[in-house]
Amino acid sequence: MKLSLKIIFILLAGLAILSLNSAAIAEETKQEEKKVKVEKVMKSTEGEISGLSNNFIAILYGSDAKTSYEIALDIGKDVKIEHKNSLKDIGVGDIVGVNYEETIETKEGEKPRVVARVAKVIKFIKAAQVIPETSALVSKEAESQQQEVK
């Protein structure tokens, strides 16, 4: 009888330790969750499309003597297209304005970091610039073709 009481006592003590440990883990998880701040901010940019797919757009929005500045954005399923019928009517080289939602995550004691950028509105501004062939290029090609004929 004494042996079974000892076993029951040991089992109860073990259960108590496990429940206290579970409570401590739950509290620690809550503390970690409280330390992360997520903020969503609407922003906008304007520039030339440098890359485009059904779910992604890249915009060259500026440059200086040493650097070109580009931003990559996911395209949300609910994206609104202005001044064109659909995303298929816009292409690389076109000038657009984009309103996008930026999600910023800040963990306590760390610098904020951008975790997502999603385009919400893409506004067509201007078609890509078409560069016509110059007469100098055409005449050089014509000369080479004439020399081949001779």
Image (cartoon, rainbow, N blue to C red):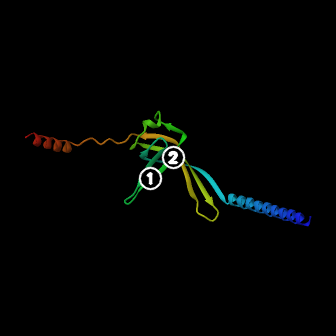
How many neighbours does mark 2 have within 10 angstroms: few (below 14), some (14-19), or many (20 or more)?
Answer: some
**Going by the image, does 95 lie left or right of 100?**
left
Q: Are marks 2 and 1 in contact (CB under 8 Å)?
A: no
Q: Find residue 72 and report its horizontal and vertical position in percent.
A: 48, 50
Give residue 90's quadrant in the image. Answer: top left
Q: Find residue 89 and report its horizontal and vertical position in percent.
A: 43, 36
Looking at the image, which residue sits at the far top?
Answer: 85
Identify the secondary structure beneath mark 1.
strand
Tag 2 residue: 74
Give residue 27's quadrant in the image. Answer: bottom right
The residue that appears at 54% across and 46% down in the rendered structure is 118
Quadrant assignment for the N terminus: bottom right
Question: Looking at the image, is mark 2 or mark 1 nearer the viewer?
Answer: 2
Q: Name the residue type under label 2.
A: Asp
**Going by the image, does 119 lie left or right of 143?**
right
Between 4 and 121, the residue placed more toward the observer is: 4
Q: Find residue 77 and report its horizontal and vertical position in percent.
A: 54, 40
Quadrant assignment for the C terminus: top left
Between 83 and 53, the residue placed more toward the observer is: 53
The residue that appears at 46% across and 35% down in the rendered structure is 84
Identify the secondary structure beneath mark 2.
strand
The residue that appears at 46% across and 45% down in the rendered structure is 57
Looking at the image, which residue sits at the far left?
Answer: 150
The residue that appears at 43% across and 47% down in the rendered structure is 47
Q: Name the residue type under label 1.
A: Glu
Tag 1 residue: 70
